[in-house]
Amino acid sequence: MTGIQFTTDAKGRKTAVVIDLRKHRAPWEDIEDGLISESRRKERSVPYEEYRASRLEAQSPTCLSTLSKSSSRRQRQFR
């Protein structure tokens, strides 16, 4: 496979890999996402409604009115 090189020890066992990210960006991003997910596995999860409520509280009243207008517009489009 081009763009991938292995480093071996004295016995010929693969010990490291060098990946050309210009050629293999997508698979590396998948690996990175998996590592991040695994590192956060034991973190407390936040229910979606709790997260959404905290995000809405952080927004200013002006943003909320804009948000509700755009939500109404979207709802009308899908009816």
Image: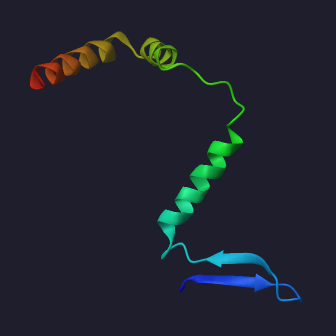
Where residue 14 sits: x, y (%)? 78, 80
Where residue 68 sits: x, y (%)? 25, 14
Q: Nearer the viewer, residue 59 or 34?
A: 34
- Residue 23's place in the image compared with 40, above or below, is below
- Residue 73's place in the image compared with 65, above or below, is below
Q: Nearer the viewer, residue 56 or 51?
A: 51
Q: How many marks?
A: 0
In this rendering, position of residue 75 left or right of residue 34 = left
Q: Quadrant of residue 5?
A: bottom right
Q: Quadrant of the N terminus?
A: bottom right
Q: Quadrant of the C terminus?
A: top left
In this rendering, position of residue 79 left or right of residue 63 = left
- Residue 35's place in the image compared with 27, above or below, is above
- Residue drawn 50% across and 15% down? 54
- Residue drawn 53% across and 59% down? 29
- Residue 42's place in the image compared with 63, above or below, is below
- Residue drawn 22% across and 19% down? 71
Q: How is the image coloured?
A: rainbow
Where residue 25 sits: x, y (%)? 50, 67
Q: Nearer the viewer, residue 25 or 12?
A: 12
- Residue drawn 51% across and 14% down? 50
Q: Quadrant of residue 61?
A: top left
In this rendering, position of residue 5 left or right of residue 22 = right
